[in-house]
Amino acid sequence: MAQKKEIRNDNTYLISQDTTDNPKLGAKILSDGRESLFLDYYFGYTKVESKKTGKQVAKKDRKREFMKLYLWQAPRTPQERQQNKETLELAKKIRFERGQELLESVEGYRLKKKRDINFLDYFQAYIDKYTKKDIRMVEIAFKRFIDFLNDTPEYNKYAKSIRPEQITKDMVEAFTEYLQSRSKGEGAKSIYARFKKVIKYAVEHDAMLKNPCTGITIKVDDQQLRKEVLSPEEIQQLIATHYERENPNIRRAFIFCLYCGLRYCDVKDLTFANVDFSNKLLKFEQNKTKGHSASSGVVIPLNDGLLKLIGRPSSSDKRDELIFPLPSYEMCLKTLKRWVKRAEINKHISWHLARHINSSYPLKTKNLQRLSA
């Protein structure tokens, strides 16, 4: 949708929509059917003497620079529209460069030197020092950003090196579209959240002047996500489906999550020490809330079917043995996707959705005979 022009009394309007832009890009409507582009600079306030009272008063210190670049006010041909597009892109780049020059002159050489870095190296250094549980998602965000730079003709010149100030709002918007083209549902949103986390860290530590992600979001259709669940019949259909070289641990773990509502990060860490076999209980602390919530402890009652799914340790002294030895999350997702397809279930099922299905259909021992069939 084209931006609505708010024409002011002097026949000018602002093109810049970000209130933090300095200078701001604008255009003056001319009588010959063109618009002359300009930059409005704001330098704060200066003290001047009032002609009426003779007293010192504060006055805004502004400057306007006409760029000698012109737009067609009402382009009629494809050539004129293309010319407008190219001229506007050039003007935005010049505005950004002028803004950087202004900030450098105000903040001095120290911050300029600190920002003279390769953001890709900065991102990798951030990952190297990262200790939280979602590090895998941060690594995926880094890889996706590099893929985006390589795959986008406009930005592939930055695939090896990009300075923080070269990451613009236009680039971030293009990146979010790229993420949504490669990931479904919550995937793109989750990856973008980690990317924003790194950007925010860079801004807070003076590696970037301002946050190019401000105001740019990825929305997920919650109604669509709610539809993508497995019915009790489809769960049984999935359990009954086998294929060559399947991973039995991934099968067991996902089915267990379907019936217990566990996250991947929790099920992969479960050991036999978490199982109270005599009282048929599973006890563990949720990784997501461990150390942050008094209610992180979880107790789940187990029936005979779930106990059979868990099995027993290889020996009585190996209580710390993993119940479900699993590969990486990405590998589990690929396997799950293949499994669902072989079961002829035409739905996009992620591991996380198992947490929300939490089937009430009883998992009986006889249902589990198919697991080893």
Image (spheres, rainbow, N blue to C red):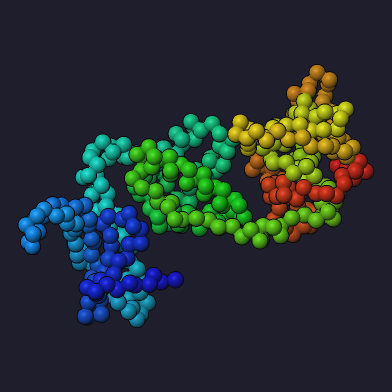
Left of 243 or right of it: where is 166?
A: left
Residue sitting at x 22%, y 57%: 41
- In the shown orientation, is residue 176 left or right of residue 275? left
Q: Quadrant of the C terminus?
A: top right
Image location of residue 148, percent across then percent down: 48, 51
Total number of numbered discs in the rendering? 0
- The residue furthest top is 317
**Res 143 seen here:** no
Q: Looking at the picture, tell me which residue is in the foreground, 312 or 242.
A: 312
Which residue is pictured at 82% across the width and 24% down the height? 314
Q: Nearer the viewer, residue 85 or 106?
A: 106
Q: Is residue 146 above or below residue 75?
A: above
Q: Is residue 291 visible?
A: yes
Instruction: Look at 37% across and 77% down and name the residue there.
Output: 78
Asked whether 258 or 240 is in front, the reply is 258
Q: Residue at x 83, y 54 (%)?
A: 232
Left or right: residue 239 versus residue 52 is right
- Return the x and y of residue 270 as percentages of the image width and height: 73, 31
Residue 237 horizontal/vertical position (percent): 84, 53
Location of the N terminus (image quadrant): bottom left
Q: Is the residue 8 above or below the residue 280 in the image?
A: below
